[in-house]
Amino acid sequence: MNSTNKRNLFQRTAIASAFLVIGATAQAANVTYSNIADANGVPALFDPATTAPDISNVNKLVLGLDNFTVSAANGAFNQVSDTLSFKVTAPSGFKITKLTYTEGGTGVSTGAFAGSSATVSLIANGKPASPGFAGFLNLSGSWGPVTKVYDFTGAGGESIVDFSVVNTLGAFAFTGSTASITKTSASITAEIAAVPLPPAAWMLGSALVGLVTVGRRKLRV
């Protein structure tokens, strides 16, 4: 290989390296959901076996549900509760900035006075968020979406989040009335942001571009 070809090879390599250094965080990236577990140990209410990322948006985890419902009649108050936990891991070069929980469902009531409720609490890395609550009186039809957001932007984002969703449904009915409430959908959606490149990376990229420029000038001489 003659000297001109060697210089050309060096220039192409330097250009490619500069783009890799400076543009690394421009690539599309997705979080990873792992260690999915149900607190009650059986596939009822929350179901870990059918909990999986959404096909159209892998940053969204669709929570599996198995007969997540409760009913009451004639002066009774009943509730069901379950906890689903999992780990969210950001891709290299990114931080998790928000996790948004969303749920919805249906309800049926009869009689003069009956009610139902949905409560959700989120726990991230051992720190609980204020609970979200939705109450319904004489509900007949769909309810939701109930949404709760856990925001990590104030801490600069997180690389890994150990996350738990604690969810409770309740139903009460006065004498002569009935009520039931069912959760039909639940999901967690992660938002991520690229971590800014450190000054050293920008300096390296600039240096590589500078070497290419000097090499080209020498070729013209």
Image (cartoon, grey):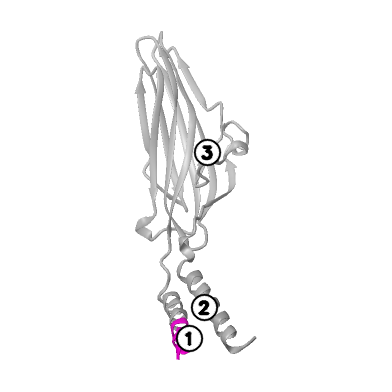
User: Disc 3 marks which amino acid?
Assistant: Val
Mark-to-mark CA distance, 1 and 2: 11 Å
Name which residue lies at 59% across and 89% down.
3
Q: SS class of the residue under badge 1?
A: helix
The one nearer the camera, 50 or 60, is 60
**Quadrant of res 152:** bottom left
Q: Are marks 1 and 2 in contact (CB under 8 Å)?
A: yes
The C terminus, quarter of image: bottom left
Q: Nearer the viewer, mark 1 or mark 3?
A: 1
Residue 215 — which label? 1
List the residue tagged with mark 3: 62
Q: Would you say residue 163 sits in the magenta stretch?
A: no
What percent of the width, then of the height, locates residue 182?
Answer: 48, 24
Magenta stretch: dominant secondary structure: helix
The extreme right residue here reads: 1
List the residue tagged with mark 2: 14
Work out whether mark 3 precedes mark 2 in sequence or the reverse, and give the earlier one: 2
Q: Nearer the viewer, mark 3 or mark 2?
A: 2
Q: SS class of the residue under badge 2?
A: helix
User: Disc 1 marks which amino acid?
Assistant: Gly
What range is drawn magenta here? 211-221
What percent of the width, then of the height, locates residue 27?
Answer: 49, 59
Name which residue lies at 41% across and 15% down.
109
